[in-house]
Image: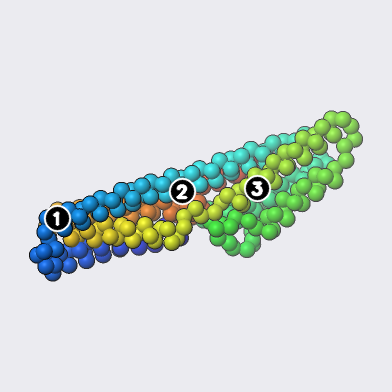
Amino acid sequence: MYPLPAALIVLALLLAGALIGVVIRPLLPEEHKAHQTVQLVHLIDGMLVTFAALVLGLMTASAKTTFDNASDDFRVLASDLVQFDDTARQYGQEADSVRRLMQTYVAATIASTWRHEPPPPGSYYPTSLAPKDVTENLDDPQLDRMLNSVGREWRRLVAHDRSHQDLLDDGREQFSRVVQAHWKLIQEVHSSISLPFFMTLAFWLFVIFLSFGLAAPRNMLVLVTIILGATSIASVAYVIVDLDTLFRGIIVVSSQPLRDALNALVR
């Protein structure tokens, strides 16, 4: 889902529900306006409002948790990259090819994931990666091959003394953490919002605003209040979907941790 269309759909549904209620109210027979009938409508309306508020809160918390987890995972990946590069730097010139491959992987990851942002400077990495919806699938076979090539080059290194052997062992462990962080991101970065569930919630809100229109008197204050209420709920829907999309919209996972890591790798 895209944030703005989702919010506009919710806003249109709520305003349409209120308008239908306002139009239908004068057409109802008098017995439908009896006190007991109105009380029953208010009771059901209150139940739906409670359910909708609970679900909106849970969806907001779920989207925020997904967003925070992705942000934390990118920071962990950046930290692991810097540690591995530091080990390769200490190893010496024999590991320069490994460092260059890792720089290529990190720069290509930034350029392909945050396509709405300026790519890293330089021409040492491929900029023609196949377009993909990173919200639904962060995996890219070309990036996977780049990362695998780093591991192969590191395993080809031969230590000539105990110090270099220790660095090789440390590098293997650190590279293993990089690979784990890489695949953890791929597995976790997915939309947490079910479209049928979202549409069910929108239907509940439609019914609530329909009942508002049935009960509301016709005056400007009521009209403004309904419009503001519908706009507020639509903005909540926007924030939920925007948080859930991770790399699209106004609220996106920051690329700064990986950019900082890349700066440390190329310095």
Side of 73 where 169 appears, left or right: right
Residue projecting furthest to the front: 36
Question: Mark 2 highlights which residue?
Answer: 63
Label 2 or label 1, whichever lies nearer to me, is 1
Question: Mark 1 highlights which residue?
Answer: 36
Identify residue type, mark 3: His
Q: Which one is nearer the viewer's eye here, 61 or 133?
A: 61
- Ranked by sequence position, the earlier of labels 2 and 1 is 1
Where in the figure is residue 185, as x and y percent of width and height? 60, 48
- Ranked by sequence position, the earlier of labels 3 and 1 is 1
Q: Is residue 8 visible?
A: no
Q: CA distance from mark 2 to mark 3?
A: 21 Å
Identify residue type, mark 1: Gln
Identify the element where label 2 is drawn.
helix
Identify residue type, mark 2: Ala
Residue placed at 43% from the left, 44% from the top? 61
Side of 233 where 20 appears, left or right: left
- Ranked by sequence position, the earlier of labels 2 and 3 is 2
Residue projecting furthest to the bottom: 27
Quadrant of residue 264 within the rendered picture: top right
Q: Residues within 10 Å of mark 2 (few under 14, many from 20)?
A: many
Label 2 or label 3, whichever lies nearer to me, is 2
Q: Which mark is residue 182?
A: 3
Where in the figure is residue 226, as x and y percent of width and height? 22, 55
Side of 81 where 188 appears, left or right: left
